[in-house]
Image (cartoon, rainbow, N blue to C red):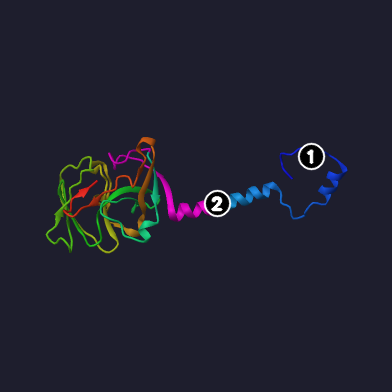
């Protein structure tokens, strides 16, 4: 029986109604079932696959700006490790209810040294260290020297707008278990739609390119 049909009230029709299949479901039941199925699909996707975030603050200027809408990939890092240059979203170590977005600078096993406005990475592959060229940063004023040795599952992260960023320089290393995922797609604003927005890699000469 269609909800939008106009039935004639006749004896024949009345007879069919009285003898209809007792198993027939009310349309509201179908709506409830559809809603439950949708919830069962959407919630796991939001929790384990991809999750939307809105950028707030200036710590990643000019790569990201307040109000931009991002989809974060929560799957990749279950199968591979974060790379230097990845833009990630994570739970703030000092308040896990807050989410931060920063760039991965140091990887497990690295020693990250910062002097003036220069970042140097020392590790097994580069015992003498190498300087990172970072064309994506907005600014970085000279600061007092610091050095951080990273252990297993530890990362050093910084914002692209170094002078306006609360990051590993202030609150220390980031544990891998706090990482939600990498910035996967920028959906808003429309003129800034991008796949892996802000991502950077390291070429054979150890210079980060964007």
Question: In front here: 4 or 164?
Answer: 4
Tell me: residue 175, above or below residue 29. Answer: below
Residue 101: image location, x then y, percent: 33, 47
Q: Are marks 2 and 1 in contact (CB under 8 Å)?
A: no
Quarter residue 190 falls in = top left
Callout in the foreground (2, 1)? 1
Residue 91 in view in this figure: no
Q: Which residue is mark 1?
A: 7
Farthest-out residue, left? 128
| Residue sitting nearer the eye, 73 or 171 | 73
Residue at the (20%, 53%) spot, across then down: 203
Q: Residue 98, relative to residue 81: is it above or below?
A: above
Query: Which one is in front, 61 or 75?
Result: 75
The span shown in magenta is: 38-67
Dot 1 falls on a residue whose secondary structure is loop
For this orientation, the residue located farthest to the front is: 12
| Mark 2: secondary structure | helix
Residue beneath disc 2? 39
131 relative to 37 in the view: left or right: left
């Amino acid at each position: 029986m269609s909800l939008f049909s106009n039935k004639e009230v006749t004896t024949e029709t009345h007879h069919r109604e009285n003898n209809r299949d007792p198993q027939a479901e009310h349309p509201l039941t179908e709506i409830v079932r559809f809603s439950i199925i949708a919830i069962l699909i959407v919630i796991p996707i939001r929790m384990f696959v991809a999750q939307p975030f809105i950028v707030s603050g200036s710590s990643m200027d000019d790569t990201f700006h307040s109000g931009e809408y991002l989809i974060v990939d929560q799957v990749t890092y279950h199968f591979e490790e974060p790379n230097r240059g990845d833009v990630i979203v994570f739970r703030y170590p000092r308040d896990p209810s807050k989410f931060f977005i920063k760039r991965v600078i140091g990887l497990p096993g690295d020693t990250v040294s910062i002097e003036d406005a220069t970042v140097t990475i020392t590790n097994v592959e580069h015992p003498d260290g190498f300087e990172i060229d970072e064309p994506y940063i907005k600014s970085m004023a000279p600061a007092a020297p610091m050095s951080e040795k990273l252990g297993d599952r530890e990362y050093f992260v910084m914002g692209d707008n170094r002078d306006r960023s609360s990051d590993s320089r202030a609150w220390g290393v980031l544990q891998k278990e706090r990482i939600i995922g990498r910035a996967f797609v920028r959906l808003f604003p429309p003129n800034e739609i991008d796949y892996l927005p802000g991502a950077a890699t390291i070429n054979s000469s150890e210079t980060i390119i964007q």
